[in-house]
Image (cartoon, rainbow, N blue to C red):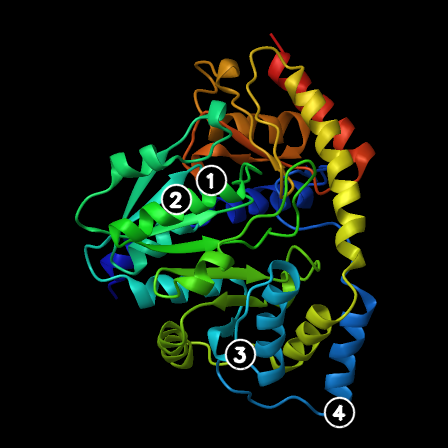
Amino acid sequence: MKISERLMRAKPSATLAVNAKAQELRAQGREIVSLAVGEPDFQTPEHVCEALKKAVDEGFTRYTPVPGIPELRKAVAGYYERFYGVKAEADNTIISNGGKHSLYNLFMALIDPGDEVLIPAPYWVSYPPMVELAEGKAVIVPTTAESGFLASVEDLEAACTPKTKVLVLNTPSNPTGGHYPQAHLDEIAQWAKSRGIFIISDEVYDRLVYEPADYSTLSGFWEKNQDNVAIVGALSKSFCMTGWRVGTTLAHPDLVKAMVKIQGQSTSNVNSMTQKAAVAAYEGPWDLIDTMKESFLRRRDIAYDIISSWPGVVCPKPDGAFYLFPVLDKFFDEETPDSASMCTKILEEAGIALVPGSAFGDDRCIRFSYAVDDEVLKSSLEKVGNVLMKK
């Protein structure tokens, strides 16, 4: 049996690999705390759970239309009007199996073999492999901690070639928590339009933005330039529904149709009962967001103060999501020369699971999630600091 060359070139998810190592140590009886987790530590709201139970009780267990049930597609369009004042129709939306699936469908629909895709680094781990699986070429655009890990038009212009077809933006960012202000996003969008470059805007963390920063989105740009951008969203972070697998795309109806074609030949519709729960999420109360933001803001400050106290560390203060991405290469040595070996050392010596920056395109850094209890966060970071400072 021969596995395709296309698949052989793709790397497995580093975040899943870290989790597997942590599970292995737990099985050996070790107490392991994960600061690698990419999901909120809050419960899915009760009204969302009740909506799923009702769907089961009413026998809503059959196939649905591939792009999602009409009321859910309408609710997604309504989300953009409610929060951003953007007018959209149901046929501008498609529901997929999580934001990851939405992104995969977009890459498959937009990329031809050899097309170049600009990806600012640090980036979410799956962007480059998805581009490669679509037979495109991922062109990594480095950014700096001093810029808050945000790409400028000048950075993008320097990486642009006649083969550049797509730009991927992520705000707030996984892994950095960096957040593009609206004016910055608009500047990039206008540059991309002038260059004929399509933007995929990953806004999965869009409601997790902390004052004094303000929300930003390319949905307003999309409203006037539907041929130039698609917006990816999800309920996983905002409604603590990571395991429910609900991703959304806001796009031109023709692009939606192309994605429906891909999805129809792969996964078909999202779980029918989950779709009913998603309607309840979009239409129901959003007070959980305020509760989470209050907790995450407090935890961000706790983690930022501790990490910033480590000598030689550079750590931009994030405006969104629930991650910090400090530059820790001052602690590398012959035994731990990179982020992966440092994460292994911290896991084995302190029992704290983290994700190496190499997975996100910057080997100087390590990703810390602060989606854990305050006291657990404090004690875990103290243990990490002890490992780093050990002579």
Residue 103 visible at all: no
Residue 184 - label: 1
Pick whichever of labels 3 and 1 is earlier in the sequence: 3
Residue 115 placement (x, y as % from top left):
22, 55
Q: Marks 4 and 3: CB-CB under 8 Å?
A: no
Quote the CA–CA distance across marks 2 and 3: 27 Å
Amino acid at the residue labelled 4: Glu
**Of labels 2 and 4, the one closer to you:** 2
Mark 3 burial class by Cα count in 10 Å: few <14, some 14-19, many 20+:
many
Amino acid at the residue labelled 1: His
Q: Marks 2 and 1: CB-CB under 8 Å?
A: yes
Residue 90 - label: 3
**Of labels 4 and 3, the one closer to you:** 3
Quote the CA–CA distance across marks 4 and 1: 47 Å
Pick whichever of labels 2 and 3 is earlier in the sequence: 3
Mark 4 burial class by Cα count in 10 Å: few <14, some 14-19, many 20+:
few
Mark 3 secondary-structure assignment? helix
Mark 1 secondary-structure assignment? helix
In-front residue for pair 115/90 = 90
In-front residue for pair 231/342 = 231
Quote the CA–CA distance across marks 4 and 3: 25 Å
In the image, residue 20 above or below residue 150? below
Pick whichever of labels 4 and 1 is earlier in the sequence: 4
Mark 2 secondary-structure assignment? helix
Question: Which residue is under mark 4?
Answer: 58
Quote the CA–CA distance across marks 2 and 1: 6 Å
Amino acid at the residue labelled 2: Ile
Quote the CA–CA distance across marks 2 and 4: 47 Å
In the image, residue 182 above or below residue 306? below
Question: Which residue is under mark 2?
Answer: 188
